[in-house]
Amino acid sequence: VIHLQLVAKNRRTITVECLCSVTRDERGEPTALILFQRDVTVQFESHDKLSKHAAQLESRNVALADAYEGVEQANRTKSEFLVNMGNELRTPINSVIGLSQKLSRNPRHNLDQEELQYLEKIRSNGEHLLVVINDILDISKIEAGKMELTRQEIAIDGLIRETLAEYEDQV
């Protein structure tokens, strides 16, 4: 099979597939040449288009894989940052909570009721901040697939009262 590119009468280049066969007499001498030709321009053009499209798709797949790896690396970096920051924040927050508890015992009896309430707010807000930090770290664990989620009911009225109590002095 031979493929030839020919210029047709309308000056369009076409691709022709040629199949040749020689007939021979009893002595093996050629007697005739049989030539079959078929226009395969559409098939060749389709193949070229498919090849170009496949190359474009491959290029996009490589770009997507690179972008995905970049996103994954950014996500890993974020998770590492959150873990490190959470651990860095826990120590001073635990200190604030512990010192506020110690002061609220008022061993010298030199604090009035208002000051004791302030210490209680400091302790309560420190514990709340510690819960927030732990929640952020839990989100990182969830994203990493290292934590199972469980559903539970919460008392929304108690949550609202706690939130309002945290801000009542600021109003």
Image (cartoon, helix red, strand yellow):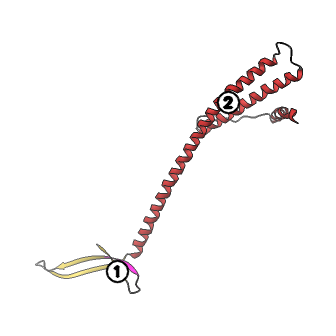
Give the CA separation, mark 2 to mark 1.
Answer: 78 Å
Q: Position of residue 168 (x, y in %)?
A: 87, 33
The residue indicated by pointer 1 is 6
The residue indicated by pointer 2 is 89
State yes or no: residue 88 in magenta: no
Q: Position of residue 163 (x, y in %)?
A: 82, 34
Q: Earlier in the sequence, mark 2 or mark 1?
A: 1
Q: Secondary structure at mark 1?
A: strand
Q: Position of residue 157 (x, y in %)?
A: 83, 35
Q: Amino acid at mark 1?
A: Leu
Up-down relation of residue 59 to residue 25 (above or below)? above
Q: Position of residue 36 (x, y in %)?
A: 29, 79
Q: Which residues are magenta?
A: 11-17
Camera-near label (2 vs 1) is 2
Residue, far bottom? 9
Q: Quadrant of residue 35?
A: bottom left
At horizontal 78% and vertical 22% (from top left) the residue drawn is 100
Question: What secondary structure prevails in the magenta region?
Answer: strand
State yes or no: residue 16 in magenta: yes
Asked whether, in this view, residue 4 is left or right of residue 159, the answer is left
